[in-house]
Amino acid sequence: MPTVGVKRDLLFQALGRTYTDEEFDELCFEFGLELDEITSEKDIISREQGDQKAEGASDVILYKIDVPANRYDLLCLEGLVRGLQVFKEKMEAPRYRRVSPVNGDPQRLIITEDTAGVRPHAVAAVLRNITFTPERYESFIELQEKLHQNVCRKRTLVAIGTHDLDTVSGPFTYTAKAPNDIRFRPLNQSQEYTATQLMSLYKTDSHLRHYLHIIEDEPLYPVIYDSNGIVLSMPPIINGDHSKISVNTKNVFIECTATDLTKAKIVLDMVVTMFIVCVLLSSLSLSLSLSLSLSLSLSLSLSLSLRESAESIAQLLTRMCLRSEVAGDDGQIQVEIPPTRSDVIHACDIMEDAAMAYGFNNITRTTPRTYTVANQLPLNKLTELLRMDLAAAGFTEALTFALCSQEDIADKLGKNISETRAVHISNPKTAEFQVARTTLLSGLLKTVAANRKMPLPLKLFEISDVVLKDETTDVGARNNRRLCAVYYNKTPGFEVIHGLLDRVMQLLEVRPGRKHGYYIQAAEDSTFFPGRCAEIFSHGESVGRLGVLHPDVISGFELTMPCSALEINIEHFL
Amino acid sequence: MADSGLLESVLRLVEKVDGGVDSQDVAGGLSVDHQVVVGAVKSLQALGEVIEATQRSSKHWEVTGEGNEILEQGSHEARVFKAIPEEGLPQSELMKLPSGKVGFSKAMSNKWIRLDKGHEGGPRVFRTVDSIEDAVREKLQQVKKGQSSQLEEKEKNELKKRKLLTEVTVKSYWITKGSNFSTTITKQETELTPEMIASGSWREKKFKPYNFEAMGVAPDSGHLHPLMKVRTQFRQIFLEMGFTEMPTNNFIESSFWNFDSLFQPQQHPARDQHDTFFLSDPALAHEFPPDYLERVKKVHSEGGFGSQGYKYDWKIEEAQKNILRTHTTAVSARMLYKLAQQEKFTPVKYFSIDRVFRNETLDATHLAEFHQIEGVVADYGLTLGDLMGVLHQFFTKLGLKKWVEVGNSGVFRPEMLLPMGLPEEVSVIAWGLSLERPTMIKYGINNIRELVGHKVNLQMVYDSPVCRLDS
């Protein structure tokens, strides 16, 4: 969920009234938002960088509001205010339409085929006769940044460029060129660079370096020119300095270049409509020009458990900026989806809004009449029963991680990683998450190591899943439910672990015996001390091993005492 | 135990007095060390109600070693005075005396002696009075005689400062007769024995009382992990509500079942490397139900089933990527797909509690793996009211209404259900929460690392109570 920070006093000013924190929290809840935090810039800096750095920072109160991930129309103060005002029926939901400029043809953006290989889509719009204030200008810049981080997926899907239209002249051309053939003065730089030079210049830029990878290795870089060959931008990296906007800009040219056309249209709509609203708030008499790419209408019959008439549901929806009216006698409602509500893609989204406006807490609770008989998963049922009896046998349950390092399941157990059948994680942030465990033993030994100060003996067990590669499944791996136990004391206690095996088999109703029962047989295993390891067979099949751990394994886990261990696959006993 | 002769002597002394006697006086009366009497008192207390003894403390003054020397030889100043003959003594010689330094300055301030600095042959000391009264020695004698109360506090403190007196605190017992007082001692048995039961001798014997203040001996037992105890309770709740357990024993999942089947777009941030663990081996999944795969692809890229879709280029390569599942809802999707393949739809209630994995930044409340609890109901015509109703029942069984805040709930989207082949009129409601969060609240644990993983303190596991969620 993105979080939007707005200045409280500006928000209240725009809403035309003040609220207590509790009242505003309640309003947010009703509108499907969450007032996450009440803070100030000073608080934030002080928390993140210490009190000293916070000295002199603004202590204007900020509301941090959590906004649903797909509600891009609520990512700025202007959008939030409009949504809330319509919700509280203080204003009508605006209708947006595109108008042609009074004097002449609409601007054009020509897309060349060269862009196909790198960033094939672009959409654009012009906003005319607007007046910024410093606050609105700031909000406009912040909105672009929020969109870049969210719907634009850090500029990979869409990148936004805004330009002072009066400094350039159309038609504009969106094309792609070799990096050395692109040369311009980028935003806030004093000299011209080629695109190649820019890429190395921005390698160290704390902000821009995160976007370089998007086009870095492409043979052609995207670029937008005006009719005089002036570079407007080299998306998705940087704009030209020539056309940069300022608080005094009157006419804004907005371009969105993209790898995803749907998202590009959503983003352009969002910038334009939010911005219009901010203009509307100041002066309603401006002449506007905007390009809308999407306007859909759905008709639906609501089958909510709201027990409301079609008329009142239409009214609820209208409060959510979805202008609605009853169409016909059979309770059908005609709903108009504004370009700001790109999140509405199915009738169920409209129903959700109706339910929200109605108030989730006002919905009458009912009990489904679904009649079912409950069943436990046999494997989990067996696990639960065995856990109880292992504890009754004096062993304590450990709970260890399913992910671990390669070392944990291989080197430290005297094994080679290639013989473990382990699945490997491609993007672990640390070595702790390199593989999924193939044995429960290492987790138990790590638990012992973390509890060396506890009185001896330590008797631990765990019944849980390991993961093994298995080509017969659709994903190429499967879980395997294991029972593992360790005995850690001044003496190895093989007889204790052996006794536990006998007890487990007794619980599983398997008698000692060669053919139809269980027996153990000497085995070679590098995890165990030579001559102190046995393989466990049940009904002729190998189900696990037990023995005294190899001294290298003991030392490998930073332990000092002898230790015996048992690990069996319990899926055999289902 | 002190010898019984001493014990009986103590008891006879106690018998003689009315109202009780101090153990110090007993020690004086019997001419034994006070500590020996204290031992006797403790032995007598252990015999039951023979005596009652209450501890008390008293302070008194004692003469120190240096004080005793003064008692014998007089104070330093008096000794200095005595050492000076009629014709005086050179100061240098006086200072060589053992009491010289201290005695000289005290005798000077008492004006018993004078110093002639200009005397021929060096400074010389003379008496100024004929006789003196050694008050320090007299005061010490008074203390020695036990008459310290006759001295003023100021005087005693002055002597304390000179390290001649010291104030000592003495702990003693005030001994009175107990309800079973007797001057003879009967030996008490510590424990009942089989022989006593056989012979009946237990009837005549007295038994040493138990100390019920002490803790018992901890049983030699195994213990269940607290998080697993809570898991058992959640399983129980679902079973009580008629929910069937889903097979969630597959940590490795394809992106297809984990994301695509749930109508989560392929560019969604949750599918980012920063949030999800991807596998390098086995990197890709194979074998998806082909018709279903096509319908999923279509609903994402073109829409359908009443949806606009996301309108992007859906790629099978993205869906094939194997991951560690990020939620158990991947299993719910598999189960609902399976349900849709039945000849005729039957309503179901499913639950699961199992591990899920996130490639997240770790902190006090987030680990890379945790347990997700999930409940799913599929039936014709389920409503939001039904969802609210089921949630209410579930959370009522948990005992705390505000626990609703720890989870998520909702109605599955038609774009997820209809491509599976479920009838259009069927709705599926679901909710989920983590197992760790309510457990941390329940047991008052603030750091998740103190609850889960190999670093937990086993003492916490040993000490954890039973889990009753509703009380």
Image (cartoon, coloured by chain):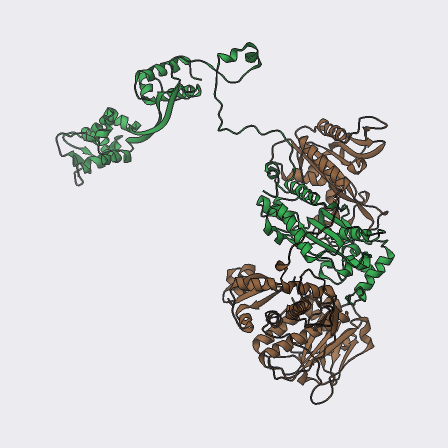
Chain colours: A brown, B green
| x 62%, y 65%: residue | A31
For residue B47, side relative to residue A503 (left or right): left
The one nearer the camera, B382 or A123, is B382
The one nearer the camera, A347 or A483, is A347
Outermost residue toward the top in this view: B199
The one nearer the camera, B356 or B6, is B356
In the picture, the quarter occupied by the C terminus of chain B is: top right
Count of all numbered marks drawn on residues in the image: 0
Q: State which quadrant residue B305 falls in.
A: bottom right
Relative to A332, is B360 above or below?
Answer: above
Image coordinates of residue A472 in percent, x first then y, are 86, 47
Q: Is residue B451 visible?
A: yes
For residue B455, side relative to residue A382 (left or right): left
Relative to B116, is A266 above or below?
Answer: below
Q: Is residue A425 visible?
A: no
For residue B377, side relative to residue A363 (left or right): right
Image coordinates of residue B403 in percent, x first then y, are 61, 51
The one nearer the camera, B19 or B244, is B244
| x 36%, y 16%: residue | B11
Q: State which quadrant residue A146 falls in.
A: bottom right
Outermost residue toward the left in this view: B130
Outermost residue toward the front in this view: A329
For residue B197, side relative to residue B283 (left or right): left
Image coordinates of residue A141 in percent, x first then y, are 63, 73
| x 85%, y 54%: residue | B286
Image coordinates of residue B132 in percent, x first then y, are 15, 30
In the picture, the quarter occupied by the N terminus of chain B is: top left
Q: State which quadrant residue A278 falls in.
A: bottom right
